[in-house]
Structure formats: structure tokens, C-alpha cells
Image (cartoon, rainbow, N blue to C red):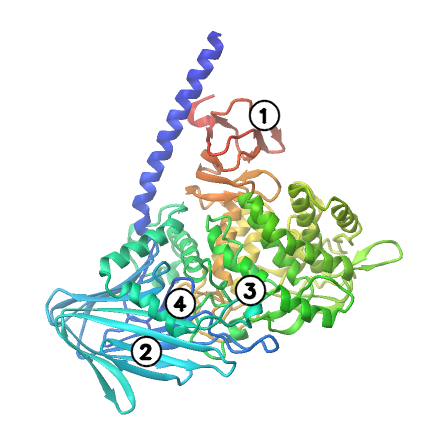
Amino acid sequence: MLLNYRQNIVCTLLSCLLLCCFINQLQAQNKEDAAFTMWDNQPAKQWMTEAYPIGNGRIGGMIFGGVNQEHIQFNDNTLWTGDENDRGTYQAFGDLFIDFDNKDQQFTNYSRKLDMTRAVHTINYTQNGIQFKREYFCSFPDKVMVLRFTANQKNAYSAVIDLKDAHDGKITASGNIIQITGKLPNGMTYQATAIVKVENGKLESVKDGNNEQLKITNADSVTIILTAATNYNNKREQNWKGEEPAPKIARILNAVKARRYDKLLKTHIQDYSNLYNRLAINLGMSDADTQKLPTYQRLINYKKVADPALEALIFQYGRYLLISSSRPGGLPANLQGLWNESNNPPWGSDYHSNINIQMNYWLAEPTNLAECMIPYLDYINSMRAVSAIATRRQYPNTRGWTVKTENNIFGGMSFLWNTPGSAWYAQALWEHYAFTNDKNYLKNFAYPIIKEIAEFWDDHLKRRPDGTLVSPMGWSPEHGPTEDGVTHDQQIVFDLFTNYIEAADVLGIDAEYSKHIADLKAHLLKPKIGKWGQLQEWETDRDDPTDQHRHVSQLFGLHPGREISTIKTPELAKAARVTLTARGDESTGWSMAWKMNFWARLQDGSHAYKILQNFITPVGGSGTDYNNGGGIYANLFCAHPPFQIDGNFGYIAGISEMLLQSQAGELQLLPALPDRWAKGSIRGLRARGNFEITDLQWRDNKVVAVAIRSLSGENCVIRSPNQLKGNVRGINEQKSGKDFRYSFKTQAGKTYYFNSLSEFGQ
């Protein structure tokens, strides 16, 4: 009894010490949030490389921050040409220009900033002794972009406001409203409307030739509320058309036009913070002088001056971009998120099915942005009917459906058939369940889609005389011959079948068909190791050790799949390492981001960090480079080049994989921690099984403390690089190679605390 009493006292004291430790960490983290601001000391000149993005998941813009003329190029992500038979392209919408009367006058103390903790842009400068301030945000709940102009003197603002349409639509100005209306050749109607409010001063509509404008004279402050819409609807049964934009916009603006600016700002920040503040990261402190520099200068200095705070800033910037470009009820982020200045953007700014849209969402679940995943899942669902028709035309004797490489918002496709594309989509459907344990979602939404994609492969696979099943006439993107048994295809089908079998088991349905799929999976052609120790890209051993193609598609089974691991399939993991080493460390931006994830899955933090450093390479031009031109621009957009947002998102996924992995049925802590991150912390990561890492702290490559919240009450398994002590009764501890493995039962809603034994003694 006395022994049990002492053990209880020790457990209680340990829990209190850990809780205090975590509270102190959270307080310190709140102070560090101020560091998550990117800024520049001059206005932007180039859209792609310098302007800063703003968005609410449907509309967005690029802010130039000019003193003489403010320029905001804006988009609505539903504005597309094309239809079910023509892929078309994502379109630019228009431009908002504000020309100030005090042109060509000197200014000082200029700064433009993006505060990622609030999703608020600020521009400050001094001109003629007057301190000017602008504050911009794009609100998801209110569906508007809001621009606020103030100064420390009265009558400071005189300006002319122009709207320019990217398609020569009609522009009208009357009273305090200026707007665009138009119609695309495919029948899509669109409208953008801005309400202008001034304090004191004069506001009037004027004409410059045929151009209608709004003119402001001697105003104390100005507020512009902008929104845009089209008649797009993601329902094929309604011919992809819904409500006309005019009544939508009227409702939106009527709801906000009388509200005070501070109320609009508060609503925006509350909504955005609910997502952003779920995760905080500290990869180490940078020198104070370094952190004072403009972001572009830190980027230039990065290879010479250690700047872990910049690495963390780019991480949180990616989360900002996803929150700003992908919200429930809307479309998923495309090749450029939702930011596009061209009516003929690179690759149509489309939805590429052979890695790009998938990479856009690798970060969503692990970094606690599950809601931002919803548009991608809805998009997959909306494509089913039209894709099934096209699939039956191409593959007459198959059920289910698949897609081509290039895709639009109407189900229109172009370029080559990417037969495993829909199976890769299915991974996202399963992953959302794996992270949330939402059985209702799995049963009523995900499972029927996963099953029909499994049925496509049930019909499409080719059976050889020896029983081996191969994907017929596949192509390893975007590389090599078209032939049977391409490794990329085989691994994706393996992943699809694995996910289908687990889904059927969770729901307790379709036992016979699940057994059939399991038999197919058992007969799939397996990954092969080639003559120079590589993981073969094709069934034929033809890989060239000097080939450094940007795609490394034969490693899908390593990441984002789960067929290959250092623990369960060490020989295949070794072969993957040989392949990855041969492909090289420098490439396009998105390719380097994927390689970070590969090296993290290989448990090699040093090499993952080396790729991370290559990724943070300043790029100046906006041309296209398919090989080694990747990096990031001054505005931290990923350079393929040109700009392609998947690299920004893949970078975040890579860091998440370095700090936590859960694809193998256990929560592996610090699986690929680089030596350069000697001390740090992260809170808010999510793991499969519906666990949240409410805090993870490390020092000298060891876990110092970790707190795990169980949201569904599942059994939990932890793998740690060092021995831990926790407040968990009935825990089972095992030594597993160089790691320590802990398994225990959990209760839904309860948090479990562990610390390193060295912190409190043995």
C-alpha cells in the first residue's frame, strides 16, 4: 500500500511539473508569434516575385503597396474558361487601382507587412510630414476584401479609384459603388463590386473618357469593401451553373456595408485565428539583427547566416496560404493557389492529377487544418459523374472512373490519361478519415468513392499467366516509356487497395468484396531492386544512375504511400535511398519539397535539412525551368519556376514529417530531426488515430517533453528516440532497436504527458 501511495504521489508531482512546463512553453510561444511577419521596405514591382498574397478561400489578391498608386490584382477561383470537353484555363479577374494626388513626392519610413498570425497586411510610410497607414484583410465569414486607409492628419486622402477587367467587361461607377460585369464565351457570368466609404471629404463618380471612376477629395480616411462572384456551381446535375453573381454580391455587401471597420476586422481575425493558432512552431532563435531585416534580405543572407526563424516563418506562411486559398464550400487550391494574373497562365493554373493537387494537401491534416481539406474532397466528389463517362469511352469494360493529367472545375480534362490519378485522389479521402476517425464521413462520403475507384482497378488490371497483376500501359510521370507494370502505378494501386480494405473493415461491410480486393493486392507486381541497388522505376531494369529527372515517381510507396519503411521493409528503403541519392538534391521547387518528405521517411534528418536549405534559394526570374532552377521568390512563393504553390505546401509537409510520423500505426516522435535544430518545440500537430500533439519539446536530438491528446479514445503507440516517463498507468514499454516504444489505452478527451527521464532524474 505504501509503495502504491508513493507511486501515486510521484505521478501527481510529475504531472504538475509537466503541466507547468507546457504552460511556460505556451506563454513563450505567444511572444514568438510576433516573429511570423514577412515584410519589405519598398513597394512591389513584380506580381510573381514581390507582391504579397491575400485571400479568403474564394477571392484573393496580390498587393503591390505602391505609394503613388496602389495596385491590387484580384481573383475569384471559380472564373474559368472551358467546360466538360475543353479543359480551358483559370482566369485573371481584374485590377483595382488607387491613384493618389500626391504623386512623385518623396516618402520615407516605408514598410509593407503581412502578419501571418492575423492575416492582416499593413503599409506604412511618411509623406509631406503625414504618417499614412493602410490595413488590408480578406474575410472568409463576410466574403469580402477590406482595405482601410488612415493618416495622422485630416483631409489627407485625395485619389481616383479605377477597376480594370481582364476580359473587357463593362465598368460602371455611381454614388459610392464601382463595379465590373461580364460574361465569358463559355457562358459564365461574373461581377466584382467595390463599395467606397469616406470620412469627411468628398466622394463622386467621374469619367476619364469612357472610363468610369470614383474620385475622393480631402478625406480623413477611406474604406473600400470589395467582393466578386460568378454563376459557377459545382453540381454537374445543374450544368455547373448556379445563382447569378448580382444577387450574391448584393446580399454580401448589404450584410457588411453598415458595419464598422473594427467589427469586420474582429470577425475576420476570430475566424482566421481559429485555424492558424492551432499550431505554433519554434525551430530555434535567429540573431536579433537578422530578424530585423526585410524578408527578402534574410532570404539572400540565408546561405551565409543561420536563420531557423526564417525556416519556421516559411512553414507558417504555407499554412497562411492554404487557409487563404482553400476553405469549406469552395474550390481546392490549384497550381497557383487562387492567385493568377494571366488569362493564359502556366499549365492553365489547373488541377494536375499526377502529384500537384495531391501535394497541395499533404500539410492539411498533420498541421491541424482539416477544414481546409474539405474543398479537395468535395472537388473529387464533384468530378465523379463526368469522369465516369469519359473513362467508359476510353476504357469500355471498366466500372468506376479515373482522370487525365490536366483537369478543370467542370470535369474537363486534357493531356494524357493518368490512370492511377483517381486512386491517388482516394488516398486523400482515406487520410481524412485516418486523422479524424469520423466514421459517418467514411461511411456516407468517402467509402462509396474509394470503392468505385477500387472497382476500376479490379476491372483494369492485367493478369499474367503466373497470376501476377500489373497496371497496363502506364507512364511514370513525366518520364520514360509507356508500358505495363510501371512502379509508380503499382504502388498507388497497392495504396488504394490497402485503404479500401481498411475502410471496409472499419465499417464492417462488404466483407466478400474486401477479401477479393485483398487477393488482388497480394498478386500485385511488387517493387523491384535493380542492378545498381536502386528501386526500379520500371519492371525492366533500365534506370540510368545519371538521370536526375524532377519526378521520382517510383518512390510513391515511401511517401506519401506506406508500402516502404525503414522499419518494416529495410531493403526497399535502402534501395529508395540509392535512387534518391542518384536523382540529386537540386531540382524544381516542388520536386525539392517532395524530396524533403522522402528523406524524412528514410529517417535521415540531415539530408532532409540539406534539401530544405536548397529549397530556400532566392530566385529572381519568372521564366520556366524544368530542371534545377527551383527555390523561392522574394515574396516566399515557391519557384518551379515559374510560381507553383505546391512547393510551398510540400515544404510544410516535409518539416511535419521530420518532427512526427504516424503512417505506420504509431506516433514516431522526432523521426528525422536535423542536428541544426538542436532545441525547439511544436504544438498542434495531428496524427492518424485522431491524436493531437498539444506540445512537443526537444533538446540535443532528444524528446524533453510531449503531451498527447486523445480525441477518439484509440489505443496509442509512441516511438521515441529516448526513454520517457509519463503519467500513464498500465503502459507497456519496449526497446525497439535504438528507439523506445510505448503502448497504452486512452480515453477520449484526455491528455497524456511524458518527459525525458533525464529531465527529472532516473
Residue 264 position within the rendered picture, expressed as x and y whole percent measured from the top left: 27, 59
Question: Pointers 1 and 4 in contact (CB under 8 A)?
Answer: no
Q: Which residue is mark 4?
A: 59
Other residues around mark 2 within 10 Å, as few (<14) / some (14–19) / many (≥20): many
Q: Which mark is residue 507?
A: none
Q: Identify the element where label 1 is drawn.
A: strand
Mark-to-mark CA distance, 2 and 1: 66 Å
Location of residue 214 with respect to 20 vertically, above or below:
below
Which comes before the other along the chain, label 1 or label 4? 4
Mark-to-mark CA distance, 3 and 4: 31 Å
Identify the residue shown where x is 53% and y is 44%.
436
Q: Quadrant of residue 190?
A: bottom left
Q: Identify the element where label 2 is drawn.
A: strand
From the viewer's perspective, is 36 left or right of 570? left
Between 18 and 337, the one nearer to me in the picture: 337
Give the mark toward the camera: 1 or 4: 4
Residue 461 position within the rendered picture, expressed as x and y whole percent measured from the top left: 78, 60
Give the mark toward the camera: 2 or 3: 2
Other residues around mark 3 within 10 Å, as few (<14) / some (14–19) / many (≥20): many
Mark-to-mark CA distance, 1 and 4: 51 Å
Mark-to-mark CA distance, 3 and 1: 44 Å
Give the mark toward the camera: 2 or 4: 2
Which comes before the other along the chain, label 2 or label 3? 2
Q: Identify the element where label 3 is drawn.
A: loop
Q: Which residue is mark 2?
A: 179
Residue type at mark 1: give it.
Answer: Asn
Q: Which residue is mark 3?
A: 587
Question: Pointers 3 and 4 in contact (CB under 8 A)?
Answer: no
Residue type at mark 2: give it.
Answer: Gln
Q: Which residue is mark 1?
A: 732
Which comes before the other along the chain, label 3 or label 1? 3
